[in-house]
Amino acid sequence: MSLDAETLRIWSPFSYGSDGEHVGVYVEKRGNRVHVTDNAEALMHASSMGIRITDRRIDAVRRAVADVNISRGGTISITVDDSRVHEGVVAVLNAALAVGHFETAWAPRVRADSFTKVVADILEAELGERLLRDVQVTGASGHQLELPFAIQSKAELIYLQPVAAEDDRVNWTNVYSGFGKMTDLKNAGAEGGARVVVLEDAPTDPEMTKAISLLAMSATVVQFPKLRQWVQRHAA
């Protein structure tokens, strides 16, 4: 590796995730020291995948790769002696690859699926065979709506849609998706008690009240901590 140029761009054979974009680093000569950085590309890649980069997530990367510095802006870097350039490059590459691994857990769809599974466990425990999964129903729009759950009650079929939060904050994409489904059901004539959303709690987010108000226009809103109690009271 030559350091004659002020800054070198080095590409690795490794990629961030499923899109195949290769991980690279910048190597800059600074006197008798060498500065190695990813120029924030790893966390920018995560952001481009629809992942919200928060202080908590940056801290999680820091804990996983303690050998490098990670700025609040998401830049991974390390400054080493000339004799340790290889170690510096490896350290930054490893940190960038760690971000790629975190992408899988951070992806919004994964978080939503995880919440759906938690809801399913409670419903299964309380309802047994009365819990229906992967239910399709025709909305007023004429589209086939797919809902993860329906409950066979004595009086009617209750359609239930989980709405996951993200990082203890309201995920408005999930809120609008749940609102759209339930509005379509409402306009198709489904009774009010047959339309239910289970909203994951985000008690410190001031937007929580707004999310509840919006969803309540289309369905009964059950906040997740009260789900088991609601099932025992209303779906018996």
Image (cartoon, rainbow, N blue to C red):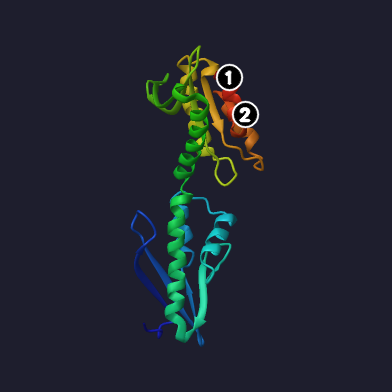
Q: What's under tag 2, amino acid-wise? A: Ser
SS at badge 2: helix
The one nearer the camera, 63 or 26, is 63
Residue found at x 46% / y 27%: 181
Give me the disc on residue 213.
2
Can the viewer see residue 79?
Answer: yes
Residue found at x 62% / y 28%: 213
**The N terminus is located in which quarter?**
bottom left
SS at badge 1: helix
The one nearer the camera, 102 or 5, is 102
Residue found at x 62% / y 40%: 202
Residue found at x 55% / y 30%: 198
Residue mark closest to the camera, 2 vs 1: 1
Q: What's under tag 1, amino acid-wise? A: His
Query: Hey, which quadrant is residue 219 in on the image?
Result: top right
**The C terminus is located in which quarter?**
top right
Rounded to the nearest angstrom, the CA distance separating label 2 from label 1 is 21 Å
As drawn, which residue projects farthest toward the bottom?
Answer: 32
Give me the disc on residue 234.
1
x, y percentage for residue 118? Answer: 51, 37
Can the viewer see residue 176?
Answer: no
- Upstream in sequence: badge 2 or badge 1: 2
Label 1, residues with CA under 10 Å away: few <14, some 14-19, many ≥20: few
x, y percentage for residue 131? Answer: 45, 24
x, y percentage for residue 102? Answer: 47, 55
